[in-house]
Amino acid sequence: MLNHDFYFDLKSLNERVNLLEEVVRRLSSEKPSTSDDWDNATLMQQWQISERTAARYRKAGLDSYKVGGRLYYTADQRNQFVLSGEQQPVNSDISGKEVCHG
């Protein structure tokens, strides 16, 4: 009986390993981010926008790609969106601090 349970557990473990290998293969085949690609947090920080505004920009045409569940934006995607005029400009207030009206 112990032998049977061991082989059943071994088979179950092998199936799980195969599933994990498939997930790793799928993630590896996705486009890797490069040093000039920004993740969503960097986009929000650099453009001084909220998470909701970033989502609105994506809906308005800001292209992105996902790797492992994280959103990334290439320099070309960001530049193209800015040139499209959909991004609200970043202005300076009286204190000289940049604020985004987006």
Image (cartoon, rainbow, N blue to C red):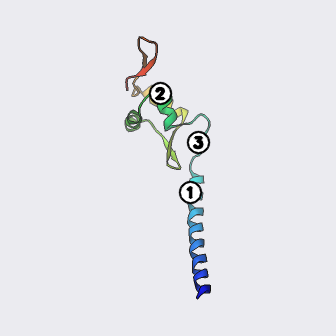
Which residue occupies 42% across, 17% down? 91
What type is the residue that disc 2 sits on?
Trp
- Report if the CB atoms under discs 3 and 2 are less than 8 Å apart: no
Q: Quarter of the image for the C terminus: give it.
A: top left
- Residue 16 vertical placement versus 46 (above, below): below
- Residue 59 marker: none
In space, the residues marked 3 and 2 are separated at their CA atoms by: 19 Å
Q: Where is residue 6 shown, x and y percent of the image?
A: 61, 81
On the picture, is 9 further left or further right than 47? Answer: right
Circle 3 is placed at which residue position?
33
Secondary structure of the residue carrying numbered label 2: helix
**Mark in the foreground, 2 or 1:** 2
Q: Quadrant of residue 90?
A: top left
Taking 90 as reference, is 1 left or right? Answer: right
Is there CB contact under 8 Å for labels 2 and 1? Answer: no
**In this figure, which residue is indicated by the disc labeled 2?**
47
The residue positioned farthest toward the bottom in the image shown? 1
Q: Which numbered disc, 2 or 1, marks the residue that appears first in the sequence?
A: 1
The residue at 60%/53% (across/down) is 28
Residue at horizontal 49%, vertical 37%? 40
For the residue marked with disc 3, what is the amino acid? Answer: Ser
